[in-house]
Image (cartoon, rainbow, N blue to C red):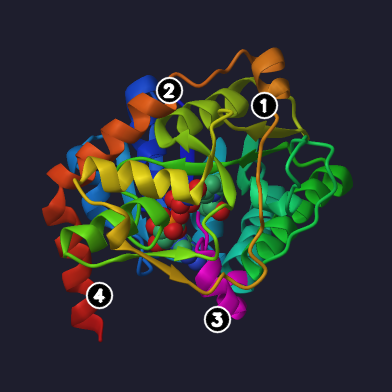
Amino acid sequence: MKKMLVTGGAGFIGSCFVRHILKKHPDYQVVNLDALTYCGNLENLDDIKDNPNYKFVHGNICNRELVRDIIKDMDYVVNFAAESHVDNSIKHPEIFVETNVQGTLNLLQACKELGIERYLQVGTDEVYGTLGKTGYFYETTPIQPNSPYSASKASADLLVRAYHETYGLPVLNTRCSNNYGPYQYPEKLIPFFISRLLKGQKVPVYGDGLNVRDWLYVYDHCEAIDVVLHKGKIGEVYNIGGHNEKTNMEITHLILDAMGKDESSIEYVQDRLGHDRRYAIANDKITSELGWEPSVTFEEGIKLTIDWYLNHQDWIKSIEDKKLAKV
Ligand SMILES: NC(=O)c1ccc[n+]([C@@H]2O[C@H](COP(=O)([O-])OP(=O)(O)OC[C@H]3O[C@@H](n4cnc5c(N)ncnc54)[C@H](O)[C@@H]3O)[C@@H](O)[C@H]2O)c1
């Protein structure tokens, strides 16, 4: 029986991971520590909330006493908790430093003081900056973040590395490309566009729409984290990606087509400040060393995803109602 702390488990990827672990490791106990910020949503975990191996704790990773109290009983810590929206980071960088940097430091310090079998930091490919038309991000690519979001995630990754080098903390660090799938907060491209089209609104495309992202189905990301946590080499970084490079315009057209809309539903808006042009992950290390490979093709995954949002309009509506109630 292993005990695992998952932070940020009420968010998009964290909730998929909690569900995945409870299914794949039925002898594990999972504690989900989540502050339930605007994007944390316990409805994402409705189906497993009564699982006897699952416990939810409402709290902040920056709370030292609470974090220590939980970590003292844990074998594994997997840190998803983060402010994750680049646009918000451009407007309010401070909260990104607080949660993503200070929160991570708080977790690392508690793990160091209390002892832990393995700590895994969930990271992003955005820490590598931007690519030209060719080439890939490798684990050895220099860290060159361009947004306050990616700078805060890069800072967290560097602290994780330092806790390993300085104190010998048994850490692992993953860096994944753009995720898509069910339960993603409708501020991110795919669910945002679907929710706008459902309301008869246009979709805002940044700049020329030719920025490239490498898309991975959320379930495959969670499986990869599970593999790295259990089989990865302590102290190492593992890139996670599925070689699915798409321009924002390609994604937009897939959504428009699936919803019976055309070009007239597109509104071109001023480009995001510091907008990275292209991300592309080399996943050779995780595939060759740990044998992980994506199981869902982009064609399958995008269909599953669009269908899920169209069939869960009540989920989108409940988030929008909560937003309105706060105004
Ligand atoms: N979404 C992607 O495409 C992607 C890709 C690579 C890496 N990541 C990383 O994966 C992680 C999860 O991303 P996501 O898309 O699921 O994000 P999300 O915004 O959907 O979820 C974040 C969760 O963290 C919680 N949280 C925020 N601040 C907290 C705090 N101070 N204490 C405790 N809980 C807090 C929120 O309530 C929410 O449940 C992040 O670390 C992100 O950087 C995301």
As drawn, is 23 to the left or to the right of 311? right
The amino acid sitting under disc 1 is Asn
Residue depth check, mark 2 versus mark 1: number of the one nearer the observer:
2
Q: How many marks?
A: 4
Q: Residue at x 71, y 21 (%)?
A: 284
Q: Which badge, 2 or 1, comes first in the chain's sequence?
A: 1
Contact between marks 1 and 4 (CB within 8 A): the answer is: no
Q: Residue at x 54, y 60 (%)?
A: 208
Magenta span covers which residues? Answer: 81-96
Q: Secondary structure at mark 3?
A: helix
Q: Residue at x 32, y 55 (%)?
A: 263
Q: Which residue is mark 3?
A: 91
- Quarter placement of the N terminus: top left
CA separation, marks 3 and 4? 18 Å
Q: Which badge, 2 or 4, comes first in the chain's sequence?
A: 2
Q: Which residue is mark 1?
A: 283
Q: Which badge, 3 or 4, comes first in the chain's sequence?
A: 3
Q: Which badge, 1 or 4, comes first in the chain's sequence?
A: 1
Name the chief secondary structure element in magenta. Answer: helix
Q: Which mark is residue 323?
A: 4
- Residue 16 image point, x, y percent: 36, 38
CA separation, marks 2 and 3? 35 Å
Q: Which mark is residue 297?
A: 2
CA separation, marks 1 and 4? 37 Å
Q: Is residue 3 visible?
A: no
For this rendering, which residue is in front, 101 or 192? 192
- Residue situated furthest right in the rendering: 166
- Residue 160 image point, x, y percent: 74, 49
